[in-house]
Image (tube, grey):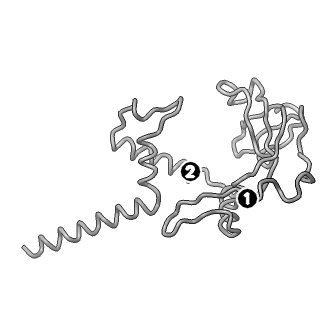
Amino acid sequence: MLNAVQSTDRNLIEQKSYQQALSDFGIEKLLEKISNYSDENFDSGQMNLEPEEMEILAVLLIQHWSDNVNGKLLGGFLNAIRHGNCALLPNSINQEIKLPESGLPINFPDVKTPDYAEGKKVRWQSACENSDWGIVLGHFLAYAPHLCRWSWKYVVLLDSNSPSSDWCVADVAWENDLVEVNNGK
């Protein structure tokens, strides 16, 4: 009888540890987000998701994010952590990058001029051979949380042969995500 009680206690402790790990690493929050997610492409309420399906979706999302991690993303978050531009909640992985309190950049309006003028042909920098491309329609200065600084953001009219042109006419991109296109794409 004593062994059965010890086994039950051990199972309860392991289950609590497992649940705590799911919470600490944001998995519970991800599962909750999936179970309540709704936009024009996906409505979990209408999908009648089973718990197993939600778990598989969470696994696939984590695998996708792991496969697509890059230095720019990691460097941006590390910079935010090291320079105090994010709020780290105690005992939590949750990170929120805050906008600067001053509003505009300190040197505004004497900021770096944009690299790409209206009418320039640009494409997104990507590890993929076939990234989107198009023509710059305009630009604006915005705070880039992933860079922890102000940067130019561009409105790009996608070329009709660009991969995303079937569902998107124009898109926005940060300056450091674009390169100029000389000829062709």
Q: Position of residue 75 (x, y in %)?
A: 69, 61
Quarter holding the C terminus is top right
Q: How many numbered markers are drawn?
A: 2
Rendered view: 179 above or below 41: below
Residue at 78%, 29% in the rendered image: 157
Q: Position of residue 176 (x, y in %)?
A: 79, 49
Any mark on residue 65, and which? 2
Between circles 2 and 1, the one closer to the viewer is 1
Which residue reaches farthest bottom?
2
SS of the residue under disc 1: loop
Residue at 72%, 26% in the rendered image: 169
Residue at 85%, 31% in the rendered image: 184
Within 10 angstroms of label 1, few (less than 14), some, or many (20 or more) residues? some
Question: Of the residues shown, which amino acid type is indicated by label 1?
Answer: Pro
Question: Of the residues shown, which amino acid type is indicated by label 2?
Answer: Trp
Residue 165 as seen in the image, left or right of residue 175: left
Within 10 angstroms of label 2, few (less than 14), some, or many (20 or more) residues? few
Any mark on residue 100, and which? 1
